[in-house]
Amino acid sequence: MTQLLLFNLFNGLIIGAFYALMALGLSLILNLSGVINFAHGGFLAIGGYLAYMLIPHIGFWGALAVAPVLTAVLGLVVERILIRPLYGRDPLYSLLLTFGLAFILEDGTRYIWGPGTLPFTIPIWLSSPLSNTLFFLTGYRLFMVALVVAAVTGLFLILNRTRLGMRIRAGTLDLETVSVLGVNTRILRNLNFGLGIYLAGLAGVLAAGMLGLQPTIGSTLIMPSFVAIIIGGLGSLPGTLLGGLLIGVASGITTVFFPSASEAVIYVLMGLVLLVRPRGLLGEEGRF
Amino acid sequence: MTNDILSGRLDRRSLIKAAAAAGVAQFAAPFVITARAADEIKFGLNDPLTGTYAELGKNEQIGCQLAIEQINAQGGILGRQAQLLVEDSTSADTGIAVQKARKLIERDKVDFLLGNVNSAMAIALGQVSNELKRLHIVTGGHTDSVTGTDCHWNVFRVCNTTRMETNSVSKTLFNKYGKKWYFITPDYAFGHTLQQGFEASLKQFGGTEVGASLTPLGATDFSSYLIQAQAANPEVIIFLLAGQDMVNALKQAVQFGLDKRFHIAGAQQELEVLEGLPPDARIGTWVFEWYWVQPDVPHVKGFVADIRKVNGGKVPSARHWFGYVAAWTCALVANDQKTLDPVKLAKALENFKLPPEIALMPYDTFYRAGDHQLMPTLYVGNAVEKGAAEEDLFKVDELVKGVDAALPVAETGCHLSWPA
């Protein structure tokens, strides 16, 4: 039993890291622009599909590098054309827009690549377990964790060591003042959106290696992202990270005792957090 | 917030413009369906075209469409042309599926109802078609009760029952691969009845169930369930999932190296799933309900060629065959009996044998009288990374007759009551 618990704990951390990666992009966009990006899952799927198209030409590593960038470019375009006009208005407008966009992206991928699952292959040396006892520690999953760590570090460095990052952080606190100080907030929000979508595309490539690549891959993965943000706290990136890890572990541990509740438990957790500490574990008060 | 939307923005002019646009839309919208010849025989296909089962529903639709084309080329039904109406039932929302079924029957006045892939929807649709008295052929929903406790006089089924699937493969698994089984079961009707079927087999042969994991439908990460399975130390891990769930679970099982330590197997497997897996994950012992490589069975090559033309060059799967057989069943029996009356057609379909060019199977294929279940052939075998042809991903080891694998009618729990 202890071994089972430990296994599930470790495994939960791995899956949690993946959820955290998805949620971070979403959180970035939400914090600065106040846009609840329901289409985040759609961009995730596009990242996976673009990688699938690129692999025969530039290999897995090439696709891993390029596909998220292409997805980010798509994100920049979407932000400029669709979302920017809605900034001054009720948050409901952008929510409805991204909600509809999610359907468009899913049906779009279905139209272009068909409803069937596409065989996404990862490099052989990555897809085997490291040892027989710790069989769930496959090279791929450890690589995923390493990538998440790299992405989080990269994000931290961007936010704290670059001018863009400084402006994003300032904008999160008070966008109006930042604008008054002479920063082009339109471009700022655009780039921030692109950064968030880059993380979505990256998560998409990773997901395609773990799961079957089909149009619904985005919509199945989007909900844990939202739950991670709510549990971790709106307005806090470390909170989102923590939220992701927590729900991964909770889901894993629940499987030991109540397997059929392993998906529901993250919502129970969310409910508890909302009841006891509505701002989230590390969130700021009065954020929304 | 509501005030924002209602006040200011929406003035009288905008309202009038919107109303005018709505009015024009009524005329401008394609109303070809109602304008077309009212004397066409309508088939209504209610299948998922979005969501998890989108591919399976789409393939059933392609099979139906080919059948309709052929039916029309051969003179139609009772001298009238056939037309296929398709409605998306979604993959998970039974309420919508039922709504669409009612629309097809009550508004579009279809003569035959076909569908659904989703077992729960198949049952619900059966209730609707029974209430509205339409001949209903269930294409791809497998749970036992459709031709068991929830059977109706007007409902017939092409695909196998979950019990037929488990019975056909369980002996092979027990004799060749091991007596201790662990189940990975999706938590809905299909999964439950598959597990029950295998449990009955285990009891019969004297094997042991070392454990089972109920997985939520649509789960993406199976690692924790696979950890449970490994800890229980079985000899065979039985995957009872379908569609995307099966792809995810198998992919992860192979990544964990579980296929090297335990035998991987299950009941139902589909070409769509094997195509979606990376080649190294195409493993395991399974049952197919129809397979495109049947060199000794006449007409199969022709069917494969016909489907390739309308399926982007890809070979047909069992789903194409389900749709094809369902549509042709209606046409054959209607032309045979020279009527469209559902009761007469249903009575005629009992013990109705499909002609070889429709059945596309080695043994006699017919609808059993007592429960309206088609008795096809089941193909037991193993998935292979690649066979002789590019798309040959399954090696058939054994052919099992449906009548042998099925429960006797008395044990299915089906009691048909005909209208007076």
Image: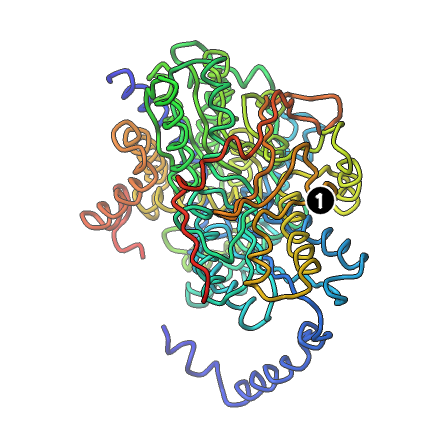
Q: Position of residue A143 (x, y in %)?
A: 49, 22
Q: Position of residue B251 (x, y in %)?
A: 52, 26
- Identify the residue shown where x is 54% and y is 19%: A127
Q: Amino acid at mark 1?
A: Pro
Pick the front one: A262 or B361: B361
Tell me the element at label 1: loop
Q: Quadrant of residue B42?
A: bottom right
- Identify the residue shown where x is 81% and y is 57%: B73
Q: Residues within 10 Å of mark 1 (few under 14, many from 20)?
A: some
Q: Is residue B72 visible?
A: yes
Q: Position of residue B153 (x, y in %)?
A: 48, 57
Pick the front one: B354 or B16: B354
Pick the front one: B418 or A208: B418
Pick the front one: B287 or B312: B287
Q: Residue tagged by mark 1?
A: B355
Q: Is residue A33 visible?
A: no
Q: Position of residue B118 (x, y in %)?
A: 49, 48
Q: Chain of mark 1?
A: B
Question: Which quarter shows the N terminus of chain B?
Answer: bottom left
